[in-house]
Amino acid sequence: MKLSDFDFDLPEALIATRPVRPRPAARLLVAQGDRVTDRHVADLPQILRPGDLLVINTTKVIPARLLGQRRRESAQGPVSAKVEITLTEPQPDGSWRALAKPLRKLATSEEIVFSAALRAEVTERGAEDVVLRFNLSGPEFDAALDAAGQMPLPPYIAGRRAADAQDREDYQTVFARTPGAVAAPTASLHFDDALMAQLRAMGVLFAEVTLHVGAGTFLPVKVDDVRDHRMHAEWGQVLPEAAAQIMAARAAGGRIIAVGTTALRLIETAATGPGEIAAWSGKTDIFITPGFHFQLADGLMTNFHLPKSTLMMLVSALMGRARIMTIYSHAIAQRYRFFSYGDASLLLPE
């Protein structure tokens, strides 16, 4: 498989920089087998069936983007310059891995001041990121980060506008509970409390899992042969209750539909065999490409993805590459809005 197999031309005008309101007003492309219909997320109660189970990701996005001043002493006196930090992963000792701009100018032992309350020391600098030790920990760190940080919007949005107060609400799901993600599980952004209540009332079931989406989700694939790509690892957890709910729904004849690629990747990681899943916790670097044998997922609700991305490979694995390219051609022709703040698709292979 070549990277070019997953490429397509996307007009820039279709890249959404704000979500529609209310959330379920987003358009929904429903691809069931060979059929494509144009609907809205609000139509899900007419599309899903009683007994279907939606797997949702309860991760909560932290305001991981920080703007600060790096400071160090030199022979000519104190040196200060602006630096942009995006936290990516907490470390066992309480420090954080982070992306930095400009990375090459950062030095170990250098201090970065983000606010009156929050500062950090660079303890390591690698080829792609740094490790930071903050002056605060626990609830004090969480409060300072909430005050100083911004929502880490994807590069294709951040390059067009700065994050603002509205993104604190827009870039968070209504069922976010477990802090740790630095990117939102964006298919879930289309749900609100009223839609959830409607679906529950008609007999649609929900299983909650957690996968902390990392900044690696935005990293480009740099190899021509996609089999050579190394997937980023993300921490996830499937509790015994969620595994039991999924097994019970499948036994009763319900479809297992993942809301978002993160939920799908997690349940396929936790699968113990065809149609079987057990409680699981740890880091997953599962890379789903055409030829993958799905153990649990009967369908996927997801937004529209970047050309040549690992997520294009995932949806191609679910629907077939030729079929997904036809679906995306339809979406572009019908002016669907793309990426994190864009519209959604419901992909049902059969």
Image: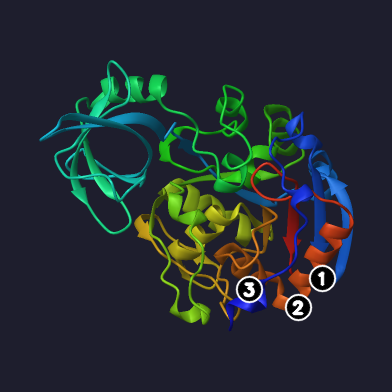
Which residue corresponds to the image point at 53% horizontal and 70% vertical from the top-left? 288
Which residue corresponds to the image point at 74% horizontal and 52% vertical from the top-left? 12
Which residue corresponds to the image point at 57% horizontal and 40% vertical from the top-left? 158
Q: Amino acid at mark 1?
A: Thr
Say which residue label 1 marks.
Answer: 326
What percent of the width, then of the height, locates residue 294?
58, 72
Q: Are marks 2 and 1 in contact (CB under 8 Å)?
A: yes
Say which residue label 3 marks.
Answer: 317
Q: Toward the viewer: 132 or 183?
A: 132
Q: Is residue 336 left or right of residue 115?
A: right
Q: For the residues marked 2 and 1, what is the alpha-carbon distance in whole angstroms?
A: 6 Å
Circle 2 residues within 10 Å: few <14, some 14–19, many ≥20: few
Q: Quadrant of residue 142?
A: top left
Q: Secondary structure at mark 3?
A: helix
Q: Earlier in the sequence, mark 2 or mark 3?
A: 3
Q: Is residue 2 left or right of residue 202?
A: left
What percent of the width, then of the height, locates residue 174?
60, 31
Q: Amino acid at mark 2?
A: Ala
Image mark for residue 322: 2
Query: Can you name the residue that lies furthest to the front here?
Result: 76
Query: Can you name the residue that lies furthest to the top here?
Result: 116
Q: For the residues marked 2 and 3, what is the alpha-carbon distance in whole angstroms?
A: 10 Å
Image quarter where the C terminus lies is bottom right
Circle 3 residues within 10 Å: few <14, some 14–19, many ≥20: some
What percent of the width, then of the height, locates residue 114?
32, 25
